[in-house]
């Protein structure tokens, strides 16, 4: 075990409950200066709740935190920030109408003669962004940036502060592998300088790569804290879920049939990906790998009819005019989008309204919605996908990330799609929920649905796909399967090293 500095904080008997849920029950955690501590557990285990207690986002019913020798006051992010506690979350806290500079240097803009020194501010922001490998104009409005670049701005703002404790709560979930690696390298540098790191991630590779110790939580209870060199991944997974988990991606027989989707000279009108030809067969899972900006996300949107395209599209031999989501759905093409909260879910609505969104005509007579008829269909879908929700009337945001993702999958099943486009289907989802989602995807493929799987997680693409397409700079540069679809080989093509 590494030799760390003095104790930074001790949390004792932290207990937090929500209506019907015990988020934390008597949890004790101690972290030292310079230590990188991973908080590991399924969604709902209490990881993020413990983080919120530390950075002031919530107040526990019981317990105390002694931080740098003094009690920590709960319930005030501003007070926690003054104590040197900085949080980076997958839930962005940026001001979209402000510039990148204003967001990065919020509360610490440099001044000269009583006024903001914008030239110096933009220079400082540019240097901070460049240090993270981010090419962003400091004067750009944050709301106009992509999700990944916004996450980069959020990270840049946090790392620009003089922090004693940095909390990373799924901070890499929207980042490419390259961008995530850069962030983690900076985190390791900060730890070497004495900053403590609390790492919350579902990516075990990141835990192994940078963390010294792991605290495992399950259902709000502390299961164990141990140096990572004393526990295996299987040990951790078993403690997380309370059962043995093996072969997370599952297995299935290859039952691939006739061509369902055919794209010919298919390209985005905005040039985000170049004209390509592609076939998807019944029961086939085709994975698409590539760096952020390679065009894979735009390909998914184009197939689903969300952006203007050129070229020829046929579904089961019938010519389809795309460029509109409704036409794509009518043709049998459905999509689970990349950002479930921004692009897929209705945030102020209940589970039933979210799951029934594409088929609201079910149970409609004379313009009147028969909610009971919709509930019957929704319950059948919930049983099929093992959806866990207190009731169909619960707000969608009361569900875990994995169950929210199941809702997005379930909503399409009554329409019997022929093609299902999945973009980052397990982003921000714990290992137990991932296993369940993978089983659902394989069942849908076994039912004859052609699946286009776009993911930034290479192990996911390798583990789930019958065939892998690699995109680089807007082009499909490789089609791999069998022995050629190794992690090393796919990674070489993803980085452009296989391109002549």
Image (cartoon, grey):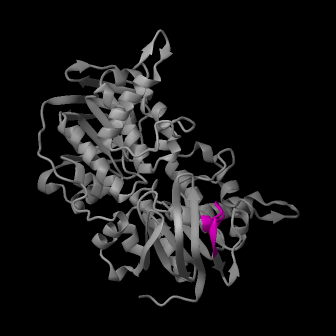
Q: Does the segment drawn in magenta span residue 54?
A: yes
| Residue furthest to the top | 366
Question: Can residue 99 be seen from the camera position used here?
Answer: yes
The residues colored magenta run 53-64
The residue furthest right is 113
Residue 156, quarter of picture: bottom right
Give 275 or 282, whichever is nearer the viewer: 282
- Examine the rendered structure and indicate whether residue 180 appears above or below residue 330: below
> Along the horizontal axis of the image, is 492 left or right of 164?
left
**In the depicted structure, whether residue 13 falls above or below residue 75:** below
Q: Residue at x 57, y 37 (%)?
A: 348
Q: Is residue 487 above or below residue 395?
A: below
Q: Position of residue 130 (x, y in %)?
A: 55, 63
Where, by quadrant of the figure, is residue 321 drawn?
A: top left
Would you say 487 lies left or right of 144 here?
A: left
Residue 298 visible in the shown view: no
Q: Position of residue 115 (x, y in %)?
A: 85, 59
- Number of marks in the image? 0
Q: Is residue 88 magenta?
A: no
Q: Is residue 188 left or right of residue 164?
A: left
Quadrant into which the N terminus falls: bottom left
Q: Nearer the viewer, residue 144 or 411?
A: 411
Q: Is residue 426 above or below residue 48?
A: above
Q: Position of residue 253 (x, y in %)?
A: 11, 46
Front residue of 320/113: it is 320
State the image coordinates of residue 135 (x, y, percent, origin top left).
53, 56
Which residue occupies the foreground of this view, 343 or 319? 343
Q: Which of the 4 image quarters holds residue 274?
A: top left
- What residue sits 46% from the left and 66% below the top? 182
């Amino acid at each position: 075990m590494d030799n760390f500095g003095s104790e930074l904080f001790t949390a004792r008997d932290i207990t937090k409950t929500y209506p019907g849920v015990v988020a934390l029950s008597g949890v004790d955690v101690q972290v030292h200066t310079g230590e990188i501590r991973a908080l590991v557990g399924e969604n709902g285990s209490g990881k993020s709740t413990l983080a919120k207690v530390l950075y002031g986002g919530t107040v526990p019913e019981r317990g105390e935190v002694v931080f740098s020798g003094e009690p920590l006051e709960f319930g005030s992010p501003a007070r926690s920030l003054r104590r040197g506690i900085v949080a980076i979350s997958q839930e962005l806290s940026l001001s979209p109408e402000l510039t990148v500079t204003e967001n990065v240097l919020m509360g610490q803009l440099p001044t000269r003669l009583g006024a903001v020194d914008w030239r110096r501010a933009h220079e400082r922001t540019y240097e901070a962004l460049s240090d993270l490998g981010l090419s962003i104009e400091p004067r750009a409005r944050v709301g106009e940036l992509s999700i990944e670049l916004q996450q980069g701005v959020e990270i840049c703002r946090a790392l620009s502060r003089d922090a004693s404790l940095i909390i990373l709560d799924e901070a890499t979930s929207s980042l490419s592998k390259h961008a995530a690696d850069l962030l983690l390298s900076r985190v390791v540098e900060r730890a070497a300088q004495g900053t403590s790191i609390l790492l919350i991630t579902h990516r075990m590779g990141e835990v192994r790569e940078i963390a010294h110790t792991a605290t495992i939580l399950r259902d709000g209870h502390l299961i164990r804290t141990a140096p990572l060199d004393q526990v295996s991944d299987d040990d951790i997974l078993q403690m997380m879920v309370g059962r043995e988990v093996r072969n997370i991606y599952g297995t299935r027989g290859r039952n691939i049939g006739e061509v369902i989707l055919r794209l010919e000279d298919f390209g985005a009108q905005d040039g985000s990906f170049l004209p390509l030809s592609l076939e998807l067969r019944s029961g086939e899972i085709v994975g698409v790998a590539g760096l952020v900006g390679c065009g894979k996300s735009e390909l998914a949107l184009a197939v689903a009819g969300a952006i203007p395209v050129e070229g020829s599209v046929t579904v089961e031999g019938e010519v389809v005019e795309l460029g509109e989501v409704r036409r794509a759905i009518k043709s049998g093409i459905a999509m689970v989008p990349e950002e479930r909260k921004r692009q897929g879910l209705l945030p102020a609505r209940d589970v039933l309204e979210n799951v029934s969104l594409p088929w609201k005509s079910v149970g409609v007579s004379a313009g009147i919605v028969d909610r009971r008829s919709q509930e019957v269909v929704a319950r059948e879908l919930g049983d099929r996908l093992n959806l866990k929700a207190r009731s169909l009337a619960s707000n969608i945001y009361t569900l875990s990330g994995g169950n929210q993702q199941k809702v997005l999958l379930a909503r399409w099943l009554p329409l019997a799609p022929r093609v299902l486009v999945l973009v980052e289907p397990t982003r921000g989802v714990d290992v137990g929920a991932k296993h369940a989602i993978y089983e659902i995807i394989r069942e849908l493929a076994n039912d004859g649905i052609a699946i286009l799987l776009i993911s930034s997680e290479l192990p996911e693409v390798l583990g789930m796909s019958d065939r892998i397409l690699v995109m680089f700079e807007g082009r499909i540069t490789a089609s791999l399967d069998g022995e050629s679809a190794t992690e090393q080989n796919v990674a070489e093509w993803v980085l452009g090293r296989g391109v002549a």
